[in-house]
Image (cartoon, rainbow, N blue to C red):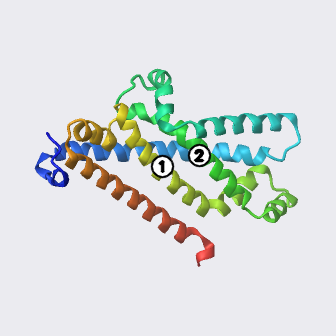
């Protein structure tokens, strides 16, 4: 199909709507599953960074150095390079290097360090006086985590998760360039490669709508939970 200027973006009869619906579901599925795993890993890594940052023991310093190094390395690698770099690892883990399932390891490894740093920063914002008060009353480290750190930082954690989820949506689009499925793959294969500008436009609009929904839901949750807004 030849590119015929601006009007080529509005030839909606050239869109395979069944394929568009399938690609939309794949994007949502990849983002949701990746975000669940990223949230768990990000909180664990962020907690390790927070707890080990001021500890004096050699073991804690080693933990902080290792976690910081891994977080900084994987947070710095551009996603499109990371997904190619991890192809052998992905093959061993999920048994394939194409399709939505194959994108999950790269999405998680790319986004979890990003979220971990936000989690660490959110924990640092918690009033240290409250933490010391809990400890002075005999509270354990687990009490501090589950009764102070997580409850007090929940609004910030949700806000950070919202930002991370939106980044994951953009990552799924980039992953489409190497066959991961989703709207990015459809826009590249049926849109760009086929000179079908309408497919590219529709896929882009759907991605924007998904981002808007995620941002709106995240903002509403933060507003509902944040006690400072009451």
Q: Mark 1 near mark 2, Cβ–Cβ under 8 Å?
A: yes
All told, the count of numbered labels is 2
Numbered circle sitting on residue 175: none
Q: CA distance from mark 1 to mark 2?
A: 10 Å
Q: The residue tagged with tag 1: helix, strand or loop?
A: helix
Could one spot residue 105 in this view of the protein? no
Instruction: State the image coordinates of residue 152 (x, y, percent, origin top left).
Output: 67, 63
Q: The residue tagged with tag 2: helix, strand or loop?
A: helix
At x 43%, y 26%, the residue is 94
At x 60%, y 39%, the residue is 76
Q: Is residue 90 above or below residue 35?
A: above
Could one spot residue 83 in this view of the protein? yes
Q: Which residue is mark 2?
A: 114
Q: Is residue 180 left or right of residue 120?
A: left
| 47 vs 138, nearest the viewer | 47
Q: Furthest-left residue in view?
A: 13
Q: Which residue is mark 1?
A: 167
The crowd level at tag 2 (other Cα within 10 Å; few <14, some 14-19, many 20+) is many
Quadrant showing the C terminus: bottom right
């Amino acid at each position: 199909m030849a590119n015929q200027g601006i009007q080529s973006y509005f030839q909606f009869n050239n869109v395979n709507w069944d394929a568009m619906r399938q690609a939309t579901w794949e994007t949502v599925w990849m983002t949701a599953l990746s975000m669940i795993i990223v949230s768990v890993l990000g909180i664990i890594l962020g907690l390790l960074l927070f707890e080990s940052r001021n500890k004096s023991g050699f073991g804690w310093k080693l933990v902080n150095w290792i976690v910081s190094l891994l977080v900084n390395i994987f947070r710095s690698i551009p996603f499109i390079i990371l997904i190619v770099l991890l192809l052998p690892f992905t093959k061993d883990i999920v048994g394939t290097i194409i399709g939505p399932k194959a994108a999950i390891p790269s999405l998680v490894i790319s986004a979890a360090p990003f979220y971990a740093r936000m989690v660490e920063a959110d924990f640092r914002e918690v009033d240290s006086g409250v933490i010391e008060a809990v400890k002075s009353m005999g509270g354990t480290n687990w009490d501090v985590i589950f009764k102070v750190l997580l409850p007090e930082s929940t609004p910030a954690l949700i806000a950070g998760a919202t930002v991370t989820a939106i980044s994951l949506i953009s990552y799924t689009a980039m992953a489409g360039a190497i066959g991961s499925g989703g709207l990015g793959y459809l826009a590249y294969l049926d849109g760009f490669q086929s000179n079908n500008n309408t497919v590219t436009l529709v896929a882009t609009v759907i991605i924007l709508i998904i981002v808007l929904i995620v941002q709106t839901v995240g903002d509403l949750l933060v507003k509902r939970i944040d006690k400072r807004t009451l």
